[in-house]
């Protein structure tokens, strides 16, 4: 662009070239049509367990809360005595996740949860929670008592039926 001075004022002598005008239009369109994406907000996950010690197959509750009302898939991860991690896919709703969990092996279990993030909230990993799964104490196997009870019931029914049939004969 060229300017000249006439009567103490600048006057535009030239016109924008067609190339310059096109560039100005494209820049305006890109700013309006494609605004800069808002930065993702940080989110914090707090993970909890209803117990720190349990026995195999006993269930306990785990839950996680988020510092924001996030909704979407989460991953529950855990290790057993340092091996793993093993994963399970879950769902967080309005910043809350909960489920019951059972451990099948003895040892030190470490559990945590991961949120992969979305357009609005950045990814996050919760604190880790440790649960010690101890061997069941001797004599605590309830299935043995159930089996013995069923055998006793069948024996009693058999004896009653035998005695009842024997008395009916003349």
Image (spheres, grey):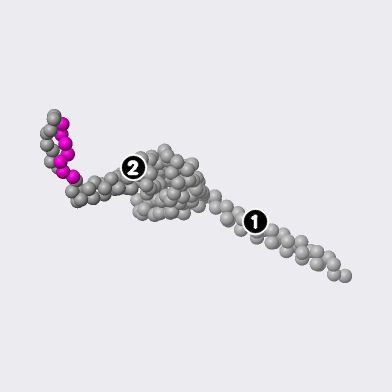
Q: Say if 10 sits above or below 108 in the image.
A: above
Provide the residue span drawn in magenta. Answer: 9-15
Secondary element under disc 1, as helix, strand or loop, is helix
The crowding category of the residue bearing disc 2, from other C-alpha atoms within 10 Å (few below 14, some 14 to 19, many at least 20), is: few
Q: Say if 147 sits above or below 40 in the image.
A: below
Which residue reaches farthest front?
A: 7
Q: Split into 4 quadrants, where in the image is the C terminus?
A: bottom right
Membership of 101 in magenta stretch: no
Which residue reaches farthest right?
A: 170
Mark nearest the camera among 2 and 1 is 2
Seen at 32% across and 45% down, the residue is 32
Q: Quadrant of residue 1?
A: top left
Total count of labels: 2
124 or 1: nearer the viewer: 1
Residue marked by disc 2? 38
Residue marked by disc 1? 149
The spot of residue 46 in percent (x, y) is: 41, 40
117 or 10: nearer the viewer: 10
Which residue reaches farthest top?
A: 8
The spot of residue 92 in percent (x, y) is: 46, 47
80 or 119: nearer the viewer: 119
The spot of residue 122 in percent (x, y) is: 35, 44
The CA span between labels 2 and 1 is 66 Å
């Amino acid at each position: 662009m060229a300017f000249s001075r006439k009567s103490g004022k600048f006057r535009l002598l030239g016109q924008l070239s067609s190339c310059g005008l096109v560039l100005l239009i494209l820049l305006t369109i890109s700013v309006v049509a494609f605004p800069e994406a808002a930065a993702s907000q940080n989110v914090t996950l707090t993970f909890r367990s209803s117990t720190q010690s349990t026995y195999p197959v006993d269930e306990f509750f785990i839950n996680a809360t988020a510092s924001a009302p996030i909704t979407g898939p989460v991953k529950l991860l855990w290790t057993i005595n340092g091996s793993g991690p093993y994963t399970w896919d879950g769902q967080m709703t309005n910043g809350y996740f909960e489920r019951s969990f059972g451990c099948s092996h003895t040892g030190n279990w470490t559990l945590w949860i991961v949120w992969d993030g979305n357009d609005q909230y950045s990814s996050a990993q919760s604190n880790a929670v440790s649960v010690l799964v101890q061997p069941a104490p001797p004599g605590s196997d309830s299935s043995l008592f159930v089996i013995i009870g069923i055998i006793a019931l069948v024996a009693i029914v058999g004896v009653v039926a035998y005695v009842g049939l024997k008395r009916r004969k003349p």
